[in-house]
Amino acid sequence: MGDLTGKVAVITGAGRGLGREEAIQFAKQGARVVINDIDRPEAVEAAQSAVEEIKGFGGEAMVVLGDCADSGDAENLMKSTLDAYGDLNIMVNNAGFCRDKTIFGMSDDEFDSVVRVHLRGHFVNMRNATAYWRDKAKTGVEVYGRLISTSSEAAIYGSAGQPNYASAKAGIIAMTMGAAQLLTKYGITCNVIMPRALTDMTASGQTAEMFQPPADGGFHAFDPANVAPLVGYLCSPEAAKISGEVLVVWGNSVQVLKRPTLGDSFINPKGNKKWELEDLHTSLAAHYDENYVPVWGGFSVPPG
Ligand SMILES: NC(=O)c1ccc[n+]([C@@H]2O[C@H](COP(=O)([O-])OP(=O)(O)OC[C@H]3O[C@@H](n4cnc5c(N)ncnc54)[C@H](O)[C@@H]3O)[C@@H](O)[C@H]2O)c1
C-alpha cells in the first residue's frame, strides 16, 4: 500500500514544519525526495537535517535551495531534480510565510510578499512540473504525476487578519482546479490540502494556545506529522482516481470540502429584461429577511 519506490518527489519549504513531515512520509514510502527551502542559514540547516533524518532510516534525499517563487530558482529546482534523479513524479507546493494585518493596516509589501510566496510560488513550480509531464506524455510515455497544493481554511472562512494570505490561498484552489481539469487526460492528479498543525507559522498568535499538545501526553492533534499520511496517500498509486479535491486535514480526521454549488436563484419578475432596483429589492429583501445574519451567518462561518 502506498508504494512510491522509484518515484521522485519535490517539496518546497521542506526543511521544517509540514513540508518536512511530508518529505519524511514520501521517503518512508520509497520515493527519492528533493527538499527545497530558502537559502538562509537556519533554513539551510533545517533542510540538511531533514536529509540526514531521511538517510538515517535508509531513504534517499537531497537539498536544492532557492526561493520557491523565483522563476530562476524554480527552474534550477526542476533541473537539479532531473539531473540527480532523472524524473519528477510528485510536486508538493508547500513553502510560505505569513505577514498578518487587518486590511486597513496592511502595507503594499505585506500584501505583495505573502501573495508572491504562496500564489506565485505555487504558479512557477506548478507550471514547470505540469509542462514537464505534458511534454513527456506527448512522447507517448506513460506519466506518473501527482500535484499537491497547500491552501488553508483562511481561504474560505475569511480570516480578517490575513487579507494577503487568505487571498493567496483562495487563488491556489482556483489554480489547482484548472490544472486538475487540464491534466486528467494524462492520468495526472491535482489536489489541495487545508492543514492545521503546530509549526513555526502557528506557534504564536491566535492559534498558539489552541494548537498546543495535551498536557497529559495524549494524542497531539496538531502534530504536523498527522497531515503527512494523507499527502502520501494522495500521491500513491491507490489514489489514482482522486483529483480536483480540497481536503481539510489535521489530527485523526480528513474532511472533504463540498464542491461549490449555486444556492437560491431569482429571476426578474418582469421577465426577459434588465433588472430595475425595485424588482431586485422585492426579490432579495424577502430572501435576506429578519432571520438573516450578515457575515457570520453567511459565507464566512468560523470553523466548528
Ligand atoms: N500550520 C498550519 O496550521 C497551516 C494551516 C494552513 C495552511 N498551512 C500552510 O502549510 C504550509 C507549510 O506551513 P508550516 O505550517 O509548515 O510553516 P513553517 O513555517 O513551519 O514552514 C514553512 C517553510 O517554508 C520555508 N519558506 C519560506 N519562504 C520560502 C521561500 N520563499 N522559498 C522556499 N521556502 C520558503 C520556510 O523556511 C519553512 O521551512 C504553508 O503553505 C502554510 O500556509 C499551514
Image (cartoon, helix red, strand yellow):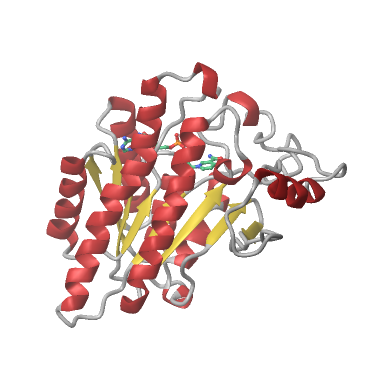
- Residue at 40 percent of width and 46 percent of height: 94
Q: Please indicate whether residue 72 sits to the left or right of residue 215 in the image.
A: left
Quarter of the view holding residue 42 = top left
* Position of residue 173 measured from the top left corner of the image (x, y, whole percent): 46, 53
Q: Please indicate whether residue 248 sits to the left or right of residue 69 in the image.
A: right
Q: Nearer the viewer, residue 3 or 146?
A: 146
Q: Nearer the viewer, residue 63 or 276?
A: 276
> Compared with residue 216, is residue 176 higher up or lower down, i.e. above or below?
below
Q: Nearer the viewer, residue 229 or 254?
A: 254
Q: Count up the numbered dots.
A: 0
Dividing the image into four equal quarters, which quarter contains ligand 1? top left
- Residue at 28 percent of width and 26 percent of height: 41
Quarter of the view holding residue 38 = top left
> Compared with residue 72, is residue 160 higher up or lower down, i.e. above or below?
above
> Compared with residue 49, is residue 275 higher up or lower down, i.e. above or below?
below
The answer to whether one can see residue 52 in this image is no
